[in-house]
């Protein structure tokens, strides 16, 4: 029991003052559990409500692609500039020092590779996400992809069920394929389905009419960088996406395959969090590359 010597009776109750518990800074998360909100706050900066995720999970379907041959040499020096790391459990355990103290969005499904038919995935054990102290689990959803749509929808549903049980948010990652449209109508449908299924974050692609995709999705959207673009175009992509309502970016190849990855991720971070224009972002990239 506390020592009662020197005990003072409570007097300052703030009578007549409104509660200072303001609404939560992450879209659609106000009614989530404390644990969910805590994990989302690690990913999305409470001051800006935005996030820069560094994605380097490509190897689980592509193998050692350019820029990911040596995670220890190419990726580890970049993690200090990211808000969150998106990777597989194998790379996390083998190549990312635990003392980097960055939130992890753990790739939580695995299956086929680029050598066969994509998206025939299964979920990893949710206990691994807990063991790795993941702040979110990323699971693919392939809307419109024949039989794979049902497989990936089932994976996403199961991941959300498990995430709700243990307080771990799920990121629904919308797939694109050769037969899938890459327009606002498709991305709005895929993103909305992810949110309706219970995903707390959606990762999708920027497109014409993107503001409609964001408006129709009740949870934050982060954009995928997609294929490697010239640095100027990639920075413009970040600016336009955030300007149209994205809560951040989840970039991989446009960072680690850049002419100067360290300069690129810092420029992207400044565009997302500080509102730099594409011209200012490119100027920053050039200055840091000198």
Image: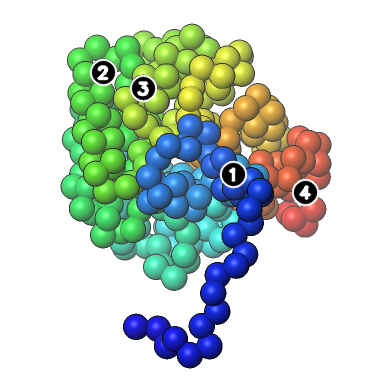
Q: Nearer the viewer, residue 74 or 31?
A: 31
Q: How many marks?
A: 4
Asked whether the viewer can see residue 268, the reply is: no
Is residue 230 rendered to the left or right of residue 162? right
Name the residue carrying label 4.
Answer: 284
* Mark-to-mark CA distance, 1 and 4: 35 Å
Where residue 147 sits: x, y (%)?
20, 15
Where residue 128 sits: x, y (%)?
23, 54
Q: Earlier in the sequence, mark 3 or mark 4?
A: 3
* Mark-to-mark CA distance, 3 and 4: 39 Å
Is residue 102 rendered to the left or right of residue 25? left
Confirm or deny contact between disc 1 and disc 4 (CB under 8 A).
Answer: no
Residue at image location 40% in from the left, 62% down from the top: 96
Asked whether the viewer can see residue 283, the reply is: yes
Q: Earlier in the sequence, mark 4 or mark 2?
A: 2
Name the residue carrying label 2.
Answer: 149
* Mark-to-mark CA distance, 3 and 2: 15 Å
Q: Secondary structure at mark 3?
A: helix
Name the residue carrying label 3.
Answer: 196
Image height of 288 relative to 178, above or below: below
Image height of 255 relative to 145, above or below: below
Q: Earlier in the sequence, mark 1 or mark 3?
A: 1
Name the residue carrying label 1.
Answer: 22
Give the quadrant of residue 32: top left
Residue at image location 33% in from the left, 16% down from the top: 143
Quarter in which the C terminus is drawn: bottom right
Q: Nearer the viewer, mark 2 or mark 1?
A: 1
Q: Earlier in the sequence, mark 1 or mark 4?
A: 1
């Amino acid at each position: 029991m506390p020592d009662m010597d020197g005990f003072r009776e409570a007097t300052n109750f703030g009578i007549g003052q409104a509660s200072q518990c303001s609404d939560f800074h992450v879209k659609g998360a106000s009614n989530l559990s404390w644990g969910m909100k805590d994990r989302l706050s690690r990913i999305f900066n409470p001051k800006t409500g935005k996030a820069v995720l560094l994605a380097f999970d490509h190897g689980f379907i592509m193998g050692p692609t350019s820029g990911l041959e040596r995670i220890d040499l190419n990726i580890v020096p970049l993690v200090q500039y990211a808000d969150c790391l998106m990777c597989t459990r194998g790379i996390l355990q083998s190549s990312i020092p635990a003392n980097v103290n960055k939130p992890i969005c753990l790739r939580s499904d695995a299956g086929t590779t680029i050598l066969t038919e994509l998206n025939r995935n299964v979920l990893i054990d949710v206990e691994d996400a807990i063991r790795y102290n993941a702040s979110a689990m990323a699971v693919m959803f392939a809307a419109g992809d024949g039989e794979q749509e049902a497989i990936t929808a089932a994976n996403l549903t199961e991941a959300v069920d498990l995430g709700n049980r243990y307080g771990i948010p799920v990121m629904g990652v919308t797939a694109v394929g050769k037969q899938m449209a890459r327009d606002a109508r498709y991305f709005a449908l895929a993103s909305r389905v992810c949110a309706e299924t219970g995903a707390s974050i959606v990762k999708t692609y920027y497109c014409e009419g993107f503001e409609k995709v964001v408006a129709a999705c009740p949870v934050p959207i982060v954009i995928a960088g997609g294929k490697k673009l010239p640095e100027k175009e990639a920075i413009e992509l970040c600016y336009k996406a955030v300007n149209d309502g994205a809560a951040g970016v989840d970039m991989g190849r446009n960072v680690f395959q850049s002419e100067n990855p360290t300069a690129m991720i810092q420029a992207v971070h400044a565009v997302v969090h500080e509102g730099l224009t594409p011209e200012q972002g490119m100027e920053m990239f050039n200055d840091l590359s000198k």
